Image (spheres, rainbow, N blue to C red):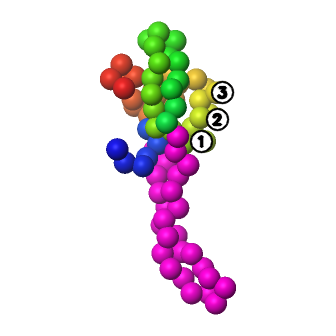
Amino acid sequence: MSRKCQLTGKKANNAFAVSHSHRRTKKLQEANLQWKRIWWPEGKRWVKLHLSTKAIKTLQTQGIDALARQAGINLNKV
């Protein structure tokens, strides 16, 4: 599985690591992704998703149904 949030689509960012002498080397800034089991009330079951920490915070306020609808995810197939 790719390192990408299933709900928000967040993924790695290309950046420069700048040293004290200002030499720049390429580095990859990965998203902070976590495997999370979330209770889905409509399906009456647990759903396991690969989420960014920002998505976990948003999930607490908006709910899993609203975020899945925005992302176009069918929770029956996850």
Which residue in the protein does label 2 denote?
Answer: 57
Contact, mark 2 vs mark 1 (Cβ under 8 Å): yes
The quadrant of the picture occupied by the C terminus is: top left
Asked if residue 8 can be seen in this view, the reply is no
Q: Residue at x 47, y 42 (%)?
A: 5
Q: Secondary structure at mark 3?
A: helix
Magenta span contains residue 13 = yes
- Is mark 3 in CB contact (under 8 Å) with mark 1? no
Q: Is residue 1 left or right of residue 4?
A: left
Numbered mark located on residue 61 in the image: 3
Q: Amino acid at mark 1?
A: Thr
Q: Residue at x 56, y 49 (%)?
A: 32
Q: Amino acid at mark 2?
A: Lys
Label ID, residue 53 = 1
Residue 64: x %, y % from top left: 53, 24
> From the viewer's perspective, is residue 44 above or below residue 67?
above
Q: CA distance from mark 2 to mark 1?
A: 6 Å
Q: Which residues, given as a range, are shown in magenta? A: 9-34
Question: In x, y percent, where is residue 48?
Answer: 45, 28
- As measured in the structure, the alpha-carbon distance from the residue carrying label 3 to the one carrying label 1 is 13 Å
Q: Residues within 10 Å of mark 3 (few under 14, many from 20)?
A: few
Identify residue type, mark 3.
Answer: Thr
Q: Residues within 10 Å of mark 2 (few under 14, many from 20)?
A: few
Q: Where is the N terminus found, in terms of image quarters?
A: top left
